[in-house]
Image (spheres, rainbow, N blue to C red):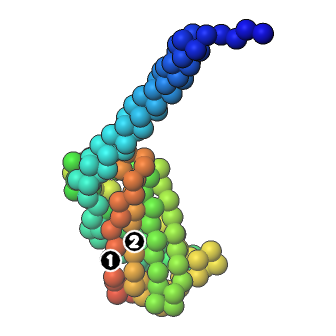
Amino acid sequence: MKGISPLIAGVLLIAFTLAVAAIIGGWLTSTVREETTQVGTGFALQVNCTKAALDIVDVVCINPVEADTGSVNVTITVANTGPIGLVSPSFLFRSNNQDICTSSFTDTIAPGSTALFRVNCSNPIYGFTDTEFLTYTRASMNCQNQITIFAEETLSNLCDD
């Protein structure tokens, strides 16, 4: 019984090793290229969003007598003081009784712009009454629909007429 010569066996072994190395090298190159692109895109997004800035300009808690509903409304004015547009504002308000009121919107605030939002924080939905103090608020918005930017403020605003 004859086998293949050692020279041919060596050539076949080297050819097989080179073929496997070429396949793994091609796969590794494309994988590294994809990962590098994803990391670069994420890094650019984070760098752009580090310039984003959101400020709470004013917060007013009112119980409008003219509506005669006993509803407690909070108006909040926020400013985008950064160079990049911010979207989807969300707000959280807390009273001295630890009642919490939240609300979200779909608006976009352009760079350098301010916007006013009105939120109904009435009983029985959230439990705010006209005798409570608004003690805390947090505004948050999304930068390029991925990174959340927020501003917080401690308050002492009476929810009255």
Viewer-nearest residue: 33 or 58: 33
x and y percentages locating residue 11 in the rendered image = 52, 13
Q: Is residue 112 left or right of residue 75?
A: left
| Residue 35 in view of the camera | yes
Quadrant of the drawing holding the C terminus: bottom left
**Contact between labelled residues 1 and 2, with CB atoms less than 8 Å apart:** yes
Label 2 belongs to which residue? 138
x and y percentages locating residue 89 in the rendered image = 42, 57
Viewer-nearest residue: 80 or 59: 80
Viewer-nearest residue: 152 or 47: 47
Mark 1 surroundings within 10 Å by alpha-carbon count, few (fewer than 14), some (14 through 19), many (20 or more): some
Say which element carries label 1. strand
Q: How many marks?
A: 2
Residue at mark 2 to residue at mark 1: CA–CA distance: 6 Å
Figure check: 148 above or below 124: above
Label 1 belongs to which residue? 153
Q: Quadrant of residue 55?
A: bottom left
x and y percentages locating residue 58 in the rendered image = 29, 71
**Amino acid marked by disc 2:** Arg
x and y percentages locating residue 27 in the rendered image = 50, 27
| Residue 116 in view of the camera | no
**Amino acid marked by disc 1:** Glu
**Residue at (40%, 62%) from the top-left corner?**
140
**Residue at (31%, 50%) from the top-left corner?**
46
Figure check: 135 above or below 64: below
Find residue 134 and name its label.
none
**Residue at (46%, 31%) from the top-left corner?**
28
**Residue at (42%, 88%) from the top-left corner?**
133
Q: Is residue 18 left or right of residue 135?
A: right
Q: Quadrant of residue 124?
A: bottom right
